[in-house]
Amino acid sequence: MNKKKEDPVKDRAALVTSAKKEYGGLDRFRMAAAILVVAIHTAPLVSYSETGDMILTGILARVAVPFFFMVTGFFLLSKERLTDFSYRNFFLKNAKLYALAVLLYLPLNFYAGHFSEGDSFTGFLQDLVFDGTFYHLWYFPGVLLGTGLLILLIRRLSGKGVLTVVLTLYLIGVLGDSYYGIASQWAPIASFYEFLFHFFDYTRNGLFFAPVFLFLGARLADKKESPVVNVSLRNLWISLSLMVLEGFLLHTFSHPRHDSMYMMLLPSMYFLFQTLIALRGKGHPEMRSIAAAVYVIHPWCIVLIRGIAKFTGTQSLLVNNSLIHFLLTALLSLLLSCLFRKLWISARAIEKGALAEEDPTGRAWSEIHLPSLQHNVKELQSLLPEECKIMAVVKANAYGHGDCRIAAELQRIGITSFAVASLKEGIRLRQYGIKGSILILGYTIPEDAEQLNKYGLTQTVVDYAYAEALDRMGQKINVHLKVDTGMHRLGEDWGHLERFSQILKFNNLTIHGIYTHLCSADSLSADDIFYTTKQIRNFYQVVRYLLSKGCSLPEVHIQSSYGVLNYPQLECTHARLGIALYGCLSEEKAGTRLDASLKPLLSVRSRVSIVKELSPKESLGYGRTFIAETPMKIAGISVGYADGVPRDLTGGYVLINGKRAPIIGRICMDQLTVDVSEIPEVRQGDIATIIGRDGEEVITAEQVAGWSGTIANEILSRLGNRLERIYKEK
Ligand SMILES: *Cc1c(COP(=O)(O)O)cnc(C)c1O
């Protein structure tokens, strides 16, 4: 079996490109749309027929910009994509481009006298937010404002609600655009628009124009069945014809303020986009950047061509003939765009060469299989009474699995309660965007009360004195009371009922829950069962006492992983699950009352760094603890105790090519050595599995724990930060 073929990172890259490749129709139309925008700004037919030009640039070419909005909606804002859409990144990327474009057009703005004394700073700001500082640049603030607005709507309203709002906005836009001549006949409407036009020059902007097209694009991406080309095409012709008729009538019989927006533009765009999706074909990623560049630079090309014509005295040919003027502008824009793209690519290549991204699977790494997390959540939830929910324990970097990513995945599949060990861990999750409750299981110094409050973290009250100190900090804090029922670690003693009722009097502490921890729930010996039963009884005595004092205790929890497997039916609102969520138990042969079919998430892999021969009597490694008895073949593996492999691992092995290779000699900080005499085909660079499956063979975290006299919890949580984590979604 050739493991290298399974390189997860490359798989993902292939996946992404193959998903995008399918929309060749969209890529090709990007070019067409960019050229249509050039046409709008150069009026190609005006030398021949005013009406012809009006139909081309005032009506038909108006599909171009909505198309670009729909592309954004289609690729970024579908239900599926929206979950990992980062508005911040989107904003930064587009704002950067916008800033560059604004700079690019500053000279022309100065030349045209736009920033002369008459123009105020607020005027410039308005331009920046709505009109774009140069006539075509409104697209950037438009897409930013429109996307932000649409996301807000989607988060707050149902699909129908969003549609209603974006259609209403569009309607307001249309009445201020091509229908303005008709709408403004009525005085109240005229004064309404007069008010609006204090803020922007056109209703064709991020507020009234962009949202509906972004939304249509997103909805088309959500549709599962693929459209039929013929039907879409027929609908497209019908809507386009009606749009031409609509535009023609408006231009002939009224005075449009502008001609970007028509009623029939909505169905036209919908069916145009649907047709383009149906066309599929091979993708043309190069067209995406070229079309964008044409859009940005063509006004400069118009100026350049006029300049050249003036300089050479060829105005009558190059400028006065509208068709030639258009063709030259389009050609120059295309040429410059291709040139920019070439330069940009070579600049990127140089940059990449300098900071080459290393392969995360180059030395030693861990792979985390996210679907197994969902499986374990379902499996464990099925063991619990329905009203008892999972509180996911993601302390210690989610037992070495990476707390932010694991918590985000849990949040995605519906978990709303989390537990961590420390304040820092809680803050990290909040900063990563984890919602829901986060309980800190450990001690937080009272001086950090402000942070608890600021990040909305729930603190464990470890005893009465602590409650008093925390209350004194004057911060409103949510707490869970911890009861020591016999573990003698954290918690106020269960017998001190008075003290519990005194905690109720602290005004700054809101008691959200109460819990205890069992110290031998993993054992099924009669003694331990007796002790655990006593702990549970002690706990409920405190709970009943507090309830009788009028305290409300919305959350009550006792069990951790073994608690659930051995005492599943307790009356609790939550179970604090750690190790079992990650698909492991602490030890290999600990029997439990319930048997859950859990799947481990994590594998640890490394590379064979060297293959050598060892002759009889030759020693190996530090302290010469291993002496060869027969000629043997050995292999160095690039992983060591600094990566989390225990130094005292004895009798352990790793897997190479689906076979066991016993670990020999002392484990070093960064490497270890294995006996590969039985695996003759081993080569430098091969993958070695420390934990996980390789072919038919598996090494579990519990096994590794057993070889070094500890529990899987320790093995997982001590995995070093030097291991790069690779998350697998399939
Ligand atoms: C770590 C911890 C848990 C989770 O324990 P597992 O055995 O990993 O499920 C639950 N409760 C408390 C108080 C803990 O410290």
Image (cartoon, rainbow, N blue to C red):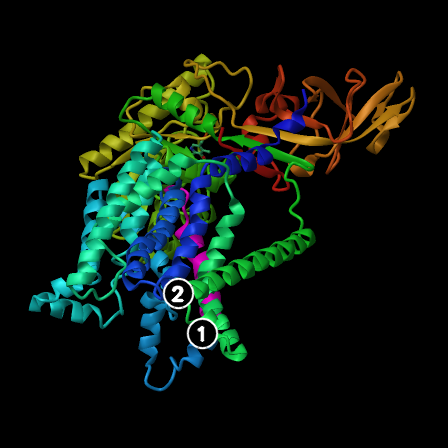
- 164 or 514, which is in the foreground? 164
Q: Position of residue 379 (x, y in %)?
A: 39, 21
Disc 1 secondary structure class = helix
Disc 2 secondary structure class = helix
Q: Residues within 10 Å of mark 1 (few under 14, many from 20)?
A: few
Instruction: Report whether 643 appears left or right of 32.
Output: right
Report if residue 83 lies within the magenta region.
yes
The image quadrant that residue 226 belongs to is: top left
Foreground label between 1 and 2? 1
Instruction: Report whether 558 appears left or right of 304.
Output: left
The image quadrant that residue 603 belongs to is: top right
Residue 13 against residue 679 in the figure, above or below:
below
Q: Is residue 447 visible?
A: yes
Q: CA distance from mark 1 to mark 2?
A: 15 Å
Tell me the chief SS of the magenta region.
Answer: helix
Residue 716 against residue 179 in the figure, above or below:
above
Residue labelled with disc 2: 42
Q: Position of residue 53 (x, y in %)?
A: 32, 61
Q: Residue furthest bottom?
A: 117
Marks 1/2 in contact by CB < 8 Å: the verdict is no
Q: Residue at x 32, y 66 (%)?
A: 130
Residue 482 against residue 3 in the figure, above or below:
below
Whichever of labels 1 and 2 marks the residue nearer the N terminus, that label is 2
Q: Which residues are magenta?
A: 82-104
Kindly identify the amino acid type of the residue bearing the numbered disc 1.
Ser
